[in-house]
Amino acid sequence: MFNARHNNNENKVLTVKINRCPQNHPCPSVKVCPVNALSQKGFDAPVVDQQKCIKCGKCVRFCPMRALRME
């Protein structure tokens, strides 16, 4: 179901670079997460639920500000 990119990220953790996130709009990456691992209160930077995250990288590729990273 998920492609090989998932395997490349299995030892990584999704992080939010708050200094890159403008925090002035609904985060577009929240909507693309297939397992709802990202959430957002108001316009704050998104928060990652590491227990739900499958490390597919969709949110990282979708974020226009490059505020989401697999590290």
Image (cartoon, grey):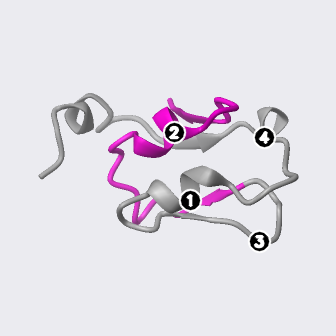
- 59 up-or-down from 67: above or below: below
Residue at 21% from the left image edge and 34% from the top image edge: 7
Disc 4 to disc 1, C-alpha distance: 13 Å
Which element is circle 4 on? Answer: loop
Q: Earlier in the sequence, mark 3 or mark 1?
A: 1
Q: Do the residues labelled 4 and 3 touch (CB within 8 Å)?
A: no
Q: Where is residue 29 shown, x and y percent of the image?
A: 56, 51
Q: Which of marks 4 and 2 is nearer the N terminus?
A: 4
* Dominant SS type (magenta): loop
The residue under label 2 is 62
Disc 4 to disc 2, C-alpha distance: 13 Å
Say which amino acid is labelled 4: Cys
Residue at 80% from the left image edge and 55% from the top image edge: 25
Viewer-closest of 28 and 48 = 28
Say which amino acid is labelled 3: Lys
Q: Where is residue 70 shown, x and y percent of the image?
A: 48, 33
The residue under label 3 is 41
Q: Where is residue 9 shown, x and y percent of the image?
A: 32, 33
Label 2 crowd (10 A; few <14 / some 14-19 / many >=20):
some
Say which amino acid is labelled 1: Val
Q: Quadrant of residue 32?
A: bottom left
The residue under label 1 is 30
